[in-house]
Amino acid sequence: MNKLFQQQIKEEKDVLLVAKPDRRLLSKVPDKEGVRTNLDRRQVKDNEGSSDISNLIEHEKMGRRYLVNYDVSIEYVSADKKVTCHGKGTDISTTGMLIEVPHEVAQDLSHASQIKLRFIITPGSMPEGYEMKVNIAAKYIRFDKNADGKTLCGVAFLESLAQYATKKKNWYMLSVAAFFLFFISACILLMRAESVLYFKFNKILYMYSIIAATFLLTRYLFGSFYRPVPIDKDFTPGVTIIVPCFNEEQWIQRTISGCINQDYPIDKLEVIVVDDCSNDQSFKKIKEIVEELKIKEQRYDIENRVYCVRQEVNAGKREALAKGTLMAKHELIVFVDSDSFLDPFAIRNIVQPFKDTKMGGVSGRTDVANTYTNALTKMQAVRYFIAFRIIKAAESYFDAVTCLSGPLSCYRKDLIVKHMDAWLNQRFWGAKATFGDDRSMTNFILRENRTGYQDTAICNTIVPNTYRIFLKQQMRWKRSWLRESLIAAVFMWKKEPFMALSFYMGVLVPLLAPLIVLYNLIYIPLTHRVFPLTFIIGICLMALLMSMAQLFLRKSSTWIYGLWFCLYYEAVLLWQMPIAWFTFWKTTWGTRMTPADLAELLKKNSKKQERA
């Protein structure tokens, strides 16, 4: 039965960044003895000569190397002679490149007075925003032979690729994006001014238009005011990372490695992986990576810092998270999904807001790991970025983030324990809640505490790359959103007035959206013979606003897919909302074989056999 289910949800191969392997499995973990820290290793100093964690993080990101396969045109001057030849780029960072060249060319480059490189950074081979044609000056560093006997020449760029991108393309991207953001906002405001003028002719329709525009523009406005909490390198509370796993054999080892490979004090970080009785090779993979870490990285005390446990029966994600929480020895609990990969500085960043003793939970930023797989994943990459950098950032401005997302979120342990029974036994209209664990726990925390968002705490997650799985995921999310929004509506009025008003507008707008679309695109044209030009322009402006925000903030070529997402939302995703109204009681995940999904599949197969 599981094979049948897997065939039904078969996905295409994901395209991910390929980082150059480090000889150490835990290259970012500080020395156990504390003799040398990552700051010492990289010799990063601020302007006054003191160690600076922010500079370390920036320096480390610039030095990250990615395996590539670029055709490189090399132009150099040696012995007053200009020579042009070709090589093959094998790995790259923002500061330099390793190029496969003939041995004699490598020798010439070692004496060259000038070196010029031309190559194309293809989408997906480096982080978003770097895809471009490059014509950059470089200097020779060294050359060596690899195991295959090929000559590899290392060069350093005279300016970083980030600096090069700023000079070459970022200035006009920012200018164009800024212009359109202003123009779009002005158009939306003018259109809503028209709604005020004609309000008396259709009070309900124009009231909805005013509310929707106000909600949208204020989110972007307050999102622009947001700033992450800066790092205090001396603030390192104890952290336990809980990774719930169910049928995640493909990614779980990478997830565990990312969780333990953190720039964080060894004695203040532990990882607990709870396998929820997977029926694939997940638990075997978990044990393999844990044993490998114990053997190869003994000096990092893996024996007492990484634990794996297995539930005897498939009890559900909440039960797995609860089991790990009760085992945890530290005061902060970080939940990480089993297909999400932490940045080496994610934990150091996500704990910073907890310097505020009233902060109960914090969400990190989730980027898409498989962005460049296809159009669907690119569309989701834009949506994720806007959802976190704009929507959650705006909520965090008022200390009231309404969903501490599953891929990366942090809570005070005492608060999880306090609400654990209610969380595990949550029922809605008689049905047991089996998903939406992140929104549900957020609601428990948000009733009496603050919740925040830390944009600098980054993880990358795998998103669906087929529409079949994507639609199932979105339906599950809409059901949990509907349930938890109705629950939050009971207490959100107690929060800061503007945040409370924004929340209720945010609930009202998507609930009524299907009716509004039907009214404008079907009823008005049929009954009044009027083409809904204004409504269509409004949709296009909202789509362009998302795309321009992505371009302005991330400078990525994926910005165009923001338009596609908004149009796809209006044509397809919007109509999942009415279905969610009447199927909120369903407990199936749709994206993996939980007991509820198995029961549903068996039921469908029985009906097919009866009809046959």
Image (cartoon, helix red, strand yellow):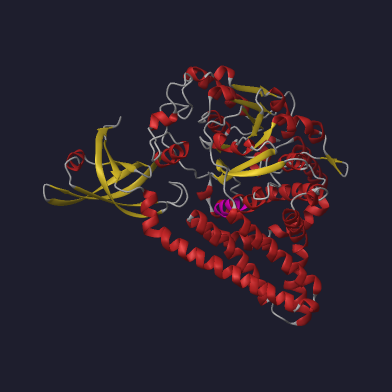
Q: Is residue 89 magenta?
A: no
The quadrant where residue 507 appears: bottom right
**Residue closest to the far right:** 430
Q: Is 430 in front, or is 185?
A: 185
Residue 344 visible from this viewpoint = yes
What is the chief secondary structure element of the magenta stretch? helix
Q: Is 262 in front, or is 611?
A: 262
Instruction: Locate the N terminus and report the quarter of the image it occupies.
Output: top right
Relative to 1, is 50 on the left or the right? left
**Residue closest to the far bottom:** 529
Residue 241 in picture, x, y percent from top left: 62, 30
Q: Give the magenta-colored segment's residue range.
A: 378-387
Q: Is residue 422 above or below residue 389?
A: above
Residue 125 in picture, x, y percent from top left: 43, 46
Relative to 272, is 378 on the left or the right? left
For the image shown, how many numbered marks are present on the structure?
A: 0
The quadrant where residue 408 appears: top right
Residue 22 visible from this viewpoint = no
Residue 111 in picture, x, y percent from top left: 16, 41
Query: Which residue sits at x=81%, y=50%?
Result: 486
Q: Is residue 599 above or below residue 563?
A: above
Residue 279 in picture, x, y percent from top left: 67, 29
**Residue closest to the far left:** 79
